[in-house]
Amino acid sequence: MNSLKEAPSASRPVAQAIPLYTNGMRVGLLGGSFNPPHRAHRDISLFAIKRLNLDRVWWLVTPGNPLKDRGALHDLGERAEAARQMANDPRIDVSCLEAVIGTRYTVDTITYLRRRTSGLRLVWIMGADNLAQFHRWQSWQRIAAAVPIAVIDRPPQSFRALSAPAAQALAHYRIPENQAGRLADCAAPAWVFLTGMKSNLSSTGLRNPDGSWKK
Ligand SMILES: Nc1ncnc2c1ncn2[C@@H]1O[C@H](COP(=O)(O)OP(=O)(O)OP(=O)(O)O)[C@@H](O)[C@H]1O
Ligand SMILES: O=C(O)c1ccc[n+]([C@@H]2O[C@H](COP(=O)([O-])O)[C@@H](O)[C@H]2O)c1
């Protein structure tokens, strides 16, 4: 087993920057605010493991989505601890890697991981709501060129996502859903839109108007 532990920290949530892994593993990366984590995070992770033939999914708890208002964002440690409790599966690891390496941008995270975990097959996982605004992410073309991407359908975002600028620009690189199992082996750019799981759950629905988490 390889273990890379960057920037030692006294606090448990950030101590484990890169989860334990073995070369050759197929690892899905689910970046998220997890404010709070919910059942769909777990469900889409297990769905992705199955459909993409992954060994693991790493939840990367962001210090703060660059496109979201951070006013209502709970403390990173609190979100990471809640995410660990929600994940509750040996194939899902929770990491605060981005806080450790000091970035909020996915392009930096992917670049960092590609350099340090060259023995892994990485897949970026995101819900359809994120595909709809992927063209607003920093250096989104570089992300798409660096790692295969799996998009999980998320009603009511399906049409908006598939007609959005990034989906249009990358249309040529989309593989059919029935070939999702080979996505991790594809050279980027490559992406798939998975429709087999649909959940209406959202963190927004689990927050009170003042930003506190519903009990
Ligand atoms: N119900 C869902 N179906 C598909 N993807 C989801 C679902 N919930 C979350 N995701 C995806 O999981 C990742 C992390 O999501 P995040 O932590 O922002 O939760 P969220 O429910 O989208 O939060 P919020 O409601 O605050 O925007 C994102 O890529 C998001 O698209
Ligand atoms: O890099 C960017 O510009 C960027 C812009 C928007 C979102 N992201 C990432 O997308 C992931 C999902 O964010 P969220 O808030 O929808 O859970 C999370 O890892 C964010 O850091 C990244």
Image (cartoon, rainbow, N blue to C red):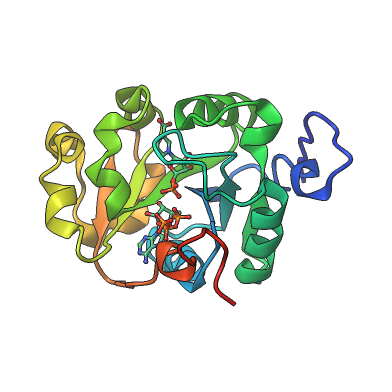
153 versus 192 height, above or below: below
Regarding ligand 1, which quadrant of the image does it lie in?
A: bottom left
Direction from residue 69 to residue 17 in the image, left or right? right
- Residue found 55% across the figure and 49% down from its top: 73
Q: As rendered, which of 26 and 160 lies closer to the eye?
A: 160
Instruction: Give the image location of residue 103, x and y in percent.
Output: 58, 27
Direction from residue 53 to residue 116 in the image, left or right? right
Direction from residue 104 to residue 79 in the image, left or right? right
Q: As rendered, which of 36 and 19 lies closer to the eye?
A: 36
Direction from residue 196 to residue 10 in the image, left or right? right
- Residue found 45% across the figure and 60% down from its top: 53
- Residue found 27% across the figure and 45% down from its top: 131
Number of labelled discs? 0
Instruction: Give the image location of residue 204, x and y in percent.
Output: 41, 62
The residue sitting at the bottom extreme is 215
Instruction: Give the image location of residue 157, x and y in percent.
Output: 20, 58
